[in-house]
Image (cartoon, coloured by chain):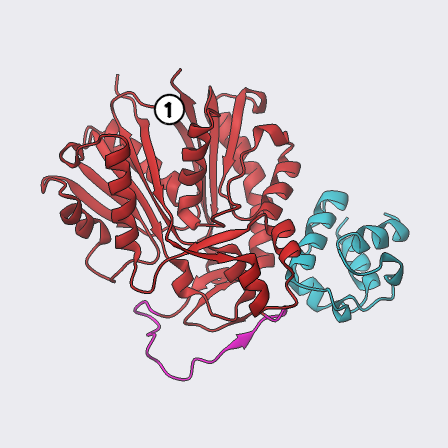
Amino acid sequence: MKENDFVKNFALQFDETDPESISLSTNFKDLEEWSSLVALSVMAMVDEEYGVRITADDFKNSSTLADVFETIKKRL
Amino acid sequence: MIKAYIKAISYYLPEKVLTNESINSDFPEWSVDKISSKTGIFNRHIAAENEFSSDMALKAANILFTDHQIKPSSIDFILLCTQSPDYLLPTTACILQDKLGIPTNAGALDFNLGCSGYIYGLALAKGLIYGGIAKNVLLITSETYSKFIHPQDKSNKTIFGDAASASLISADEGIAEILDFELGTDGQGAENLIVKRGGVRYDKSILGVSDKKDDFGNITNENNLYMNGTEIFNFTSSAVPSLIEEVLKKNKLLKEDVELFIFHQANKYMLNHLRKKIKINEDDFYYFLEDCGNTVSSTIPIALANAIKDKRIKNNVLLAGFGVGYSWGGCIIKAIE
């Protein structure tokens, strides 16, 4: 699992946010567009791309994309 | 040899329509385009203030009787699925027996299930027919979730619509034969989709039940419908693929033998995810939610009624419902050519 691909896949779940503005250190919950639907999109993407299940609590316990990346890595 | 068939299906949608434009005017951050592209829903129908589950059930049944020339006197059992009954007691199905003029020697009962309800209804009806207990079962689904939803709960308001359906399940040959079922239950998920107050354990009249905001800004309180969307997503995503596999196995079929898959119409986003995960061709997967939204136990009969109208019911059709409980179920129906 590559960091770059993960960031790109994560950014793809947003419609209005500029993908260039999203990086591993982004506090995703502070993004204006972050919503329950984007959260579901990310969960679906992680399931489809990595075969890993993440939960709402994982988002709650994460601040940055890097935190989510680490959670997924642990479950691979 | 006894068999059970779906003989006719009709449905009723309330007159009042809630559009994406109207949702957008209450929640400006929720754009019309975004609502429709993510959920696949453009309109939902909402029961009138003085319109309740029994009223909608009555209308659906009357449409069924008129459109398919069915005599109320031919019905010998009423099964009614609802989670928003008019009363704690008596049973809604008993009220319907009287209002529809169904003979007093008919059996009638309500059962409380949500999105899996139609599948369970088919299973119960088939059991009654195979057991020689009934010949013509009136299976009704009727739900007014809108009355449970907090006015500021953007997510649930967007997804759910009210509706009722009526099906005739009969020992006489009809549109499709009801084949084998796979059912499942996991009460561990009870808290994730719940209306906590209004039953006997937690009285609705208790004061001090205050509004709470979830992680994503949706407002609800214990008197209202609460849905933990992310947990429901994870449940569905893990339970439904194996459900489909088991339904196929029980019916000794391969995925390729199924002409059409009709799932509970939760929302387009969830359906697409499931379809991709199970690897079903888009052409073999039925969508019907644009103008009614997620109508809980009525989504499958509404979709089925439209698939019949579109002449899409050929050979084997797989039906699958899943949701509140957690509860899930699936079956194959085989079209009578």
Picture layout, residue B329 above or below residue A21? above
Q: Tell me where the magenta segment starts and ends, as one range.
A: B198-217
Residue B280 shows in the view: no
Q: Which chain, by letter, is red?
A: B
Point out residue B67 in the picture as x, y percentages from the top left corner. Answer: 28, 33
Relative to B296, say whether B227 is above or below: below
- Compare residues B242 and B283 and report the one nearer the observer: B283
Residue at 40% x, 45% y: name it: B298
- Dominant SS type (magenta): loop
Tag 1 residue: B176
Provide residue B114's location: percent of width, then percent of height: 41, 51
- Measuring from the top left, give residue B280's x and y in whole percent: 62, 31
Residue at the spot x=41%, y=32% of the render? B181
Total labels: the figure holds 1
Q: Is residue B201 magenta?
A: yes
Rendered location of residue B291, percent (x, y)? 49, 47
Q: Residue placed at 37% from the left, 24% from the top?
A: B176
Q: Chain of mark 1?
A: B
Farthest residue toward the bottom?
B208
Query: How busy is the neighbourhood of tag 1: few (under 14 within 10 Å), some, or many (20 plus)?
Result: many
In the image, residue B211 sits, relative to residue B81, either above or below, namely: below
Q: Is residue B273 left or right of residue B243?
A: right
Query: Between B336 and B83, which is closer to the camera in this rendering?
Result: B336
For image coordinates 52% across by 71% down, the residue present is: B152
Q: Colour of chain A?
A: cyan
Tell me: residue B27, above or below residue B98: below
> Which SS class for mark 1?
strand
Residue B210 in the magenta stretch? The answer is: yes
Q: Quadrant of residue B178?
A: top left
